[in-house]
Image (spheres, rainbow, N blue to C red):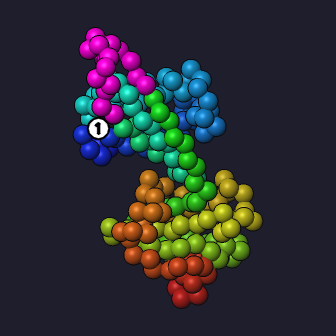
Amino acid sequence: MRLERLNYNKIKIFLPFDDLLERGLTKEDLWKNAPKVQQLFHDMMYEASIELGFEADGPIAIEIFSLQAQGMVIIVTKESPNSDLDDEYQDEYIEMQVTLDESEDILYEFSTFEDVIALANYLYPQGFIGGKLYSYNNRFYLLFDEEDTAHESHDNFIAMLAEYGNSTTLTKYRLAEYGKELMKEQAIKTLQHYFS
């Protein structure tokens, strides 16, 4: 679990799928209000309190984004408490507004361009040709949508990507806005063509 303070009343929590499995949870469990999910949220808020000084008291809004290969990104926003309530009750409750979103895209980060080329040389003979290639903050990113991975099982494809790169919490929107698009389509085919 990775924590990051976005501003004084908002934090971002990245929860890899491995952490969920260690706790005996699946991605589907997060959509339910099970005791294990409540315990997970309690643990996250406790860690945020210790590491970031973020106290989740009063009304909070939670946005959960499921990243296909990486895990869950959880944005917790502390809203200003309702002034109509007595002060003694304001610290004793948490009111949550939860928003859920799931991305079908797969985004992986690579530390060197050589790693991207090596992956392309591995994927192309297996029939993969798609993807978009970006650079951002001296790293390279491959973005795949559903159509790029339709003929391969999801777990096998993720395993292949993990051989050469790492999952990232970056979103495709951040990449599109701040990154540099190097290859707009068929990145694997293009890399294979020029660098094999």
Residue furthest to the front in view is: 84
SS assignment for the magenta stretch, majority = loop
Q: Is residue 86 magenta?
A: yes
Q: Is residue 58 magenta?
A: no
Indicate the position of residue 114 as horizontal and vertical percent values.
Answer: 45, 75
Residue at the (38%, 28%) spot, across then down = 59
Indicate the position of residue 154 as horizontal and vertical percent values.
Answer: 68, 56
> In the figure, residue 28 lies in which quadrant?
top right
Residue at the (51%, 68%) spot, across then down = 142
Q: Is residue 165 visible?
A: no
Q: Is residue 179 visible?
A: yes
- Is 72 displayed left or right of 44 in the figure? right
Above or below, 2 against 150 in this view is above
Residue furthest to the top in view is: 88
Indicate the position of residue 11 as horizontal and vertical percent values.
Answer: 34, 41
Residue furthest to the bottom in view is: 194
> In the figure, residue 85 lies in which quadrant?
top left
Q: Which residue is mark 1?
A: 9
Residue at the (54%, 36%) spot, across then down = 20
- Is 8 displayed left or right of 56 in the figure? left
Above or below, 5 against 108 in this view is above
Above or below, 138 against 155 in this view is below
Look at the numbered disc 1 and give the secondary structure of its residue. loop
The mark total stands at: 1
Residue furthest to the right in view is: 151
Over which residues does the magenta segment extend?
79-95
- Camera-side residue of 13 and 76: 76
Specify the quadrant that holds the C terminus: bottom right
- Camera-side residue of 56 and 154: 56
- Identify which amino acid the numbered label 1 is placed on: Asn
Specify the quadrant that holds the N terminus: top left
Indicate the position of residue 190 as horizontal and vertical percent values.
Answer: 57, 84
